[in-house]
Amino acid sequence: MRNLFLIFCSAVFSLSFLLINVEAAENISAKNFAGNDGMLDEHEAALYLAFIKNKPLSEFLVPGQLTIDIDKIKKVMAIDIADLKLRIGEPLWRPQELDSLAIAKKRDHQKKPGWKKITGVTVAKPLGEKGDKGSLGPIRLRKSGSELAKNSSNAKGALIGFSDNRLINGGGAWNTQGALGYPVKFFFQHGQGRSTEFEITPVFGWNLAEAEGTAEYEVNELDFSLPVIVYISPGGNKMTGTYEENISAASDRGFSRLWIVRARPYFQTDFDFRHEIYGIEASAEYVGYLFGSKLYFGGFENIASSGLQYQLRIIPRVDYSETAKGGIHTTRQEGDDWFRLGGQVALDFRIGEEYFNSLDIGTSYQFFEALSGQGGYSDLFNTYATWWLSENAGMTLEYSKGNTPVAAQKIDLVILGLEFKY
């Protein structure tokens, strides 16, 4: 069925160059190139992008060749596919995502400021032939290191604002939290839609919440880490078993999903370099529909045609850390040697993205249980509301209570501030 569909698309694509003019190509929707489930994989997205960009047939055919190789189209459009992944994440893609991105790029092409065109800094620098080997950059600004693996539209941004520390009496103070990373990606294709991407991202992170009159309840954390992230796309077929066995369990698309696996060695201290904690954390996240059902994980998904979207994330984690030196901004003592098992569950809702600046409302809960050492059980609850003023900036009201994940510092904070992401 997949091969028949690709042959059909190839034929449609060939005819389009002869029968459709530039204006019609600009108005075409990605829905016309989607599969039976309404989603697009890399091959279908390459067809769509080539169509709307009015690519000439000479880029895909040599004299005497009468049929177009779908893999050739994907290769020619490799840099566009790489840019698509950086902007909205890994496949499968929803047609409205591609349409919205295409419209936005056309609208903003002339208005794009110079600082957003710096190759390798604010725009990815392709590696290999047309980016088929990977990319350098661009710089990512997020709320925390765990958000760096997500595309910008689904991630939370760095926060700066005014906070009220409910653990003490007194007035409020300034608060800021964020992570700055620079990804280096390498792509590997295995056929049948299967691919693996390796990403190494040096990360500088911070979390600072002042407390008037005392340092005991301040949050003062500085993180340096080097996460290694592996994006694994299983492709169109199950890795084991026959096609008949696979199709009986779910549709062919049911296995074209993504796993994000991360190993993060880190060093944490405060801004005065008083405490020192060394560790390594491993985590995994599934992105896609659950076993062919309509329940989606890892990204924003439409709820019918209500204009409401949801994002459900479940991230199991394992962590080992050692405290080389204690300090006033951590409850941990020198010699603390913790091995912990835990995770994070998050549920977010997005309202009105198609009609006005979107409003995000959500909650998350992360926890760790020490299997060795004196760490015990620690957790952190967070709930927030963010009104996005633009694709990169928003206004956020947030409440957090519990313990910070590494330094185990107690917090009970209400924050009102501005959020930025890139």
Image (cartoon, helix red, strand yellow):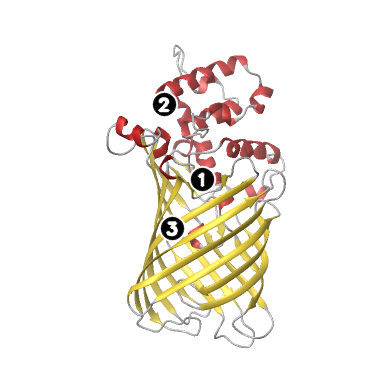
Toward which corner of the image does residue 314 lie, by quadrant?
A: bottom left
Mark 3 or mark 2, earlier in chain: 2
Q: What amino acid does circle 1 point to?
A: Gly
> Which disc, if any, is residue 315?
3
Q: Which one is closest to the eye, mark 1 or mark 3? A: 3
Q: Which mark is residue 38?
A: none
Q: Amino acid at mark 3?
A: Ile
Q: Are marks 1 and 2 in contact (CB under 8 Å)?
A: no
Q: In the displayed structure, would residue 176 be above or below residue 86?
A: below
Q: Residues within 10 Å of mark 2 (few under 14, many from 20)?
A: few
Where residue 414 appears, x then y in whole percent? 63, 72
Residue 2 - label: 2
Q: Residue at x 38, y 71 (%)?
A: 369
Q: Farthest residue toward the bottom?
A: 213
Three-letter code for the amino acid on which mark 2 is drawn: Arg
| Mark drawn on residue 89 | 1
* Vertical comparison of 92 with 71: above or below: below
For the N terminus, the image quarter is top left
Q: Which badge, 1 or 3, comes first in the chain's sequence?
A: 1
